Amino acid sequence: MGQGSGNWNEEMPGIIGLGVAGNFAGHLEQAGEASDFKDLKIADATAPKGVFPFYVPGQGEHFLHVMPVSSETLALGLVEEKHQIEPEVALLCDIAYDDGKVSALTPRFAMAHNDCSIRREGARKISEKKNWGANTKGTSAQRIAIDQFSGGLLDKYRLASFLLRDGELHDYGDDSALTSYSYYGDKLVGWLIEKMNQQQDEGPLEDIPRWLEVAGQPGRALISIGATRYTEYGETTFLEHGDVIAVVLYDGSVHDDASVRGFADGSRESAVDGLSLLRQRVV
């Protein structure tokens, strides 16, 4: 399938932004967030912890109504807070409803995504660490068209992430196969539909059916499906002004490590098949 591209500033007013928490073994522990979910009752120990909103189109003064997605820049918040890349895959999905409930969720495109987070002690909800204004999320403008989410071309794709600081490229997250996600493909889609219809306000989670109502039951969702594990460098290194973030979603049967690092540091042409590249300058 071919690639597409888009302008998030034009599109996002009609799209709800959602994220999946805890869908990659070990990430929450590295991020110091596992204890946030200790009181939640989850039947499947391998399942993600829940869904959180990072953007809700609509009117009003709520911080979730501020469109945070950028393909080029990442704006830090308070200087005393720690900001960390969260390398992810985002899916642009069509939503269908039946009698006010989500009846179908169809992934159309996959993109490299940075679910950048503030490591904010005492935050009541996940969303309070996810959207602190414009240009605080990253989604690549390069889109990989999805043929089918289970057993399709994405099964060959991998996700890598890097931080370019003072001219040196550092591995930030483990290079990981998409099939390494705890929930993936049709299993993840079924779980997402359930959460979009049933998840209530509990602990760090929020009432997702209510947010869908606030958004006017939008026909599309941008869903980041979970952050991969950090390298030792990524786990202990936080963002600074002048850094360049690179998240690389790539076809592992086409691109090798040297190519991926060239995409990340900007030395290699990135308008190629089998690639969704996100590069953000920290401002």
Image: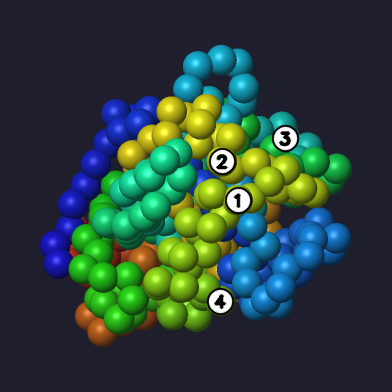
Tag 2 or tag 3, which sits nearer the N-term? 3
Which residue occupies the extreme left position in the image? Answer: 2
Q: Is residue 218 above or below residue 37?
A: above
What separation in Å lies between label 1 and label 2 (alpha carbons)? 7 Å
Identify residue for label 3: 79
Q: 95 left or right of 79? A: left
Residue 175 appears in view: no
Residue at mark 4 to residue at mark 2: CA–CA distance:
24 Å
Badge number at residue 182: 4
Question: Which labelled disc corresponds to residue 209?
Answer: 2
Label 1 environment density (alpha carbons within 10 Å; few <14, some 14–19, many ≥20): some
Q: Nearer the viewer, residue 15 or 173?
A: 15
Question: Cβ–Cβ below 8 Å for labels 1 and 4?
Answer: no
Circle nearer the N terminus (4, 2): 4
Q: Nearer the viewer, residue 15 or 140?
A: 15
Numbered label attached to residue 166:
none
Q: Residues within 10 Å of mark 3 (few under 14, many from 20)?
A: few
- Dot 1 or dot 2, earlier in sequence: 1
